Image: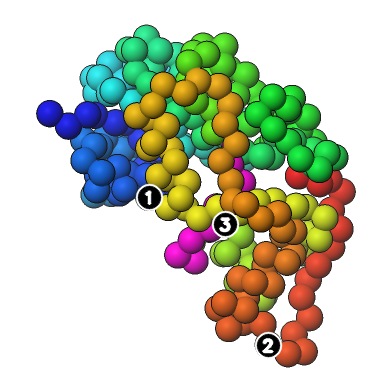
Amino acid sequence: MARRILITGATGYLGSRVAERATDAGWSVIGTYLRAASDIAEAQLDIRDATAVRNLVRQVRPDAVIHTAAGRDDWRAMADGAAHVAAAAAEQGSRLVHVSSDAVFSGREVDYDEVASPDPVYRYGAAKAAAETAVAAVDPTAAVVRTSLILGYGRGQHEVLTRDLIAGRVQGALFTDMIRKPIHVDDLADALLELAASSYGGVLNVAGPDAISRYDLGVLIARRAGLDRPGSPWPRSRSRVCA
């Protein structure tokens, strides 16, 4: 019998790829959605609702849970939601892989390892740090994956933002002093699935090998898409934080 895996946020960019690759790898996949179902996400779930999370995990009885659902501007979804998923998974005895972010760091240091303490400087990073704290407190055996900018198939947030800036659909800038280590969505998805089948507990940094600024990454994305027209000024700026 195939092992059963529950993937929260399976209609999202990362979650959908995790679900697809889990299916290809032979897992029995149950994906969740918040607003609109898909072929691979058939279980509606609001992770802000602790009772709903507990009931679904009890019903599904998964061998593993990969928590990709977030809600970027919603503290309750990012922080409280992670705690709800961790508690429900622990109660059921399910293996938990929680997706976090390098945004938990300020960027004041050059390098960060797995024992570095979070020092977020904006709300998103603070919510992610709070989520990590909750997951570790509830289930120290869970894998907490700190990743970076996720790219691939033109659907990554930074890829979309770059195109929108060039087209004038949004106003803003790509920061020259925000340094990240981008990773392809499929590489990250495969790493999460490998962790789901393992017993690794604690924080693990999972990102690409190359450090690059948001601005320079945008230039590369534009070139690949044929959008770096000569004479077209690129919006750039230094940020107030480095994260």
Q: Picture coordinates of residue 186 (x, y %)?
A: 42, 52
- Amino acid type, callout 3: Gln
Q: Which residues are magenta?
A: 146-154
Q: Crowding near pointer 2: few (<14 within 10 Å), some, many (20+)?
A: few
Q: Picture coordinates of residue 68 (x, y %)?
A: 46, 37
**What is the secondary structure assignment of the residue under circle 1?**
helix
Quadrant of the snapshot with the N terminus? top left
**What is the secondary structure assignment of the residue under circle 3?**
helix
Residue sitting farthest toward the bottom: 230
Q: Is residue 91 above or below residue 234?
A: above
Is 1 displayed left or right of 165 in the figure?
left
- Tell me the residue at 53%/58% (across/down): 151
Q: Picture coordinates of residue 179 (x, y %)?
A: 75, 52
189 and 92: which is toward the camera: 189
Measure how far apart labels 1 and 2 are at the Cα level: 32 Å
For mark 3, what is the residue? 157
Q: Crowding near pointer 1: few (<14 within 10 Å), some, many (20+)?
A: some
Q: Residue 229 has which mark?
A: 2
Is 105 displayed left or right of 64 in the figure?
right
